[in-house]
Amino acid sequence: MECLKILTSFLIAVSFISILPISVQEWNSCNLRFFCIMLPIAGILFSLSWFILWFTLSHLVMLSCSLRGFIMCIFTLALTGGLHTDGLMDTCDAIFSHKDRETRLKILSDTHAGSFAVMGCIIILMAKSFLFAELLMSHTDILTLSFIPSYSRLGMSFILVNLPFAKNNGLAVMLGSSRNKHDNISIVIMLLVFSFFTHKIIPFIMIIFAFLWGKLCMKIFGGITGDLLGAFVELSEVIMLMGLVILNCI
């Protein structure tokens, strides 16, 4: 029975964070019991896709690094269906509105994109394109780079398990309805396993940013929402990519 719950939670996690056409059962508390710890496992599928595309682009030397970086960026966007980018855009509108907490939470739920959302989207996509291009020129460690999407989902899982919800309803509440503090043990184990295959600076960057992002969410919103989790994924990936670029320069 537990194995079935784990499998169902994994399929829900994959269907949620990707565009893969996976049919799953109802999203109830029973089926979502292991959702939080399945997020980074589902992230391994993203790591595999990053690895395959990066390996392919690395050998397409007839294309410029800028074009290959752009292709890599668009691929990462398409694979998620823009889910996390949408969360980032809503978060930008809410944070930079400089309104009170309740108004900011309403902005997060607003389906319309404001000027800060557009600017945030453009900046994050440009940053990813340029960072990918820079890493292609420096022949970075492909294994470390490939694990970045796994680390970002691991951080999202940790935040979802440990931070309170900013609202009584919404996506984060539904996905985290069966969260358990004991899930932290599995998260730490996965962090140690991932760290075995990558440079230690990447998990360090992710941990620091997860801590800071959690503090920001608590201060501005009083907790987390689905949009804030999506924004974390996008921003953490950019910061980890930036860390790799700096590492290659040392």
Image: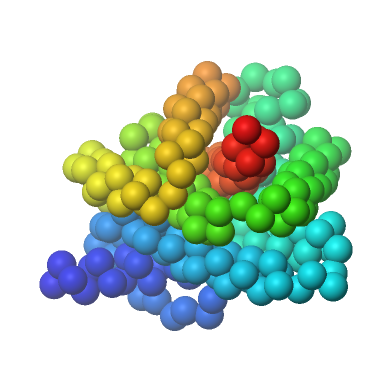
Q: Is residue 191 visible?
A: yes
**Residue placed farthest to the front in the image?**
250
- Of 59 and 29, nearer the camera is 59
Residue at the image point whose x is 69% and y is 32% from the top: 94
- Of 214 and 51, nearer the camera is 51
Coordinates of residue 107 in the picture (x, y in percent) = 68, 36
Coordinates of residue 100 in the picture (x, y in percent) = 65, 19
- Res 32 → quadrant: bottom left
Residue at the image point whose x is 13% and y is 72% from the top: 1
- Res 162 → quadrant: top left
Q: Is residue 97 shown left or right of residue 221?
A: right
Q: Is residue 227 above or below residue 42?
A: above
Q: How many circles with numbers are drawn on the protein?
A: 0
- Of 41 and 145, nearer the camera is 145
Q: Is residue 53 above or below residue 120?
A: below
Q: Is residue 28 visible?
A: no
Residue at the image point whose x is 56% and y is 54% from the top: 141
Coordinates of residue 101 in the picture (x, y in percent) = 60, 23
Q: Is residue 71 shown left or right of residue 241?
A: right
Residue at the image point whose x is 50% and y is 68% from the top: 48
Q: Is residue 199 above or below residue 4?
A: above
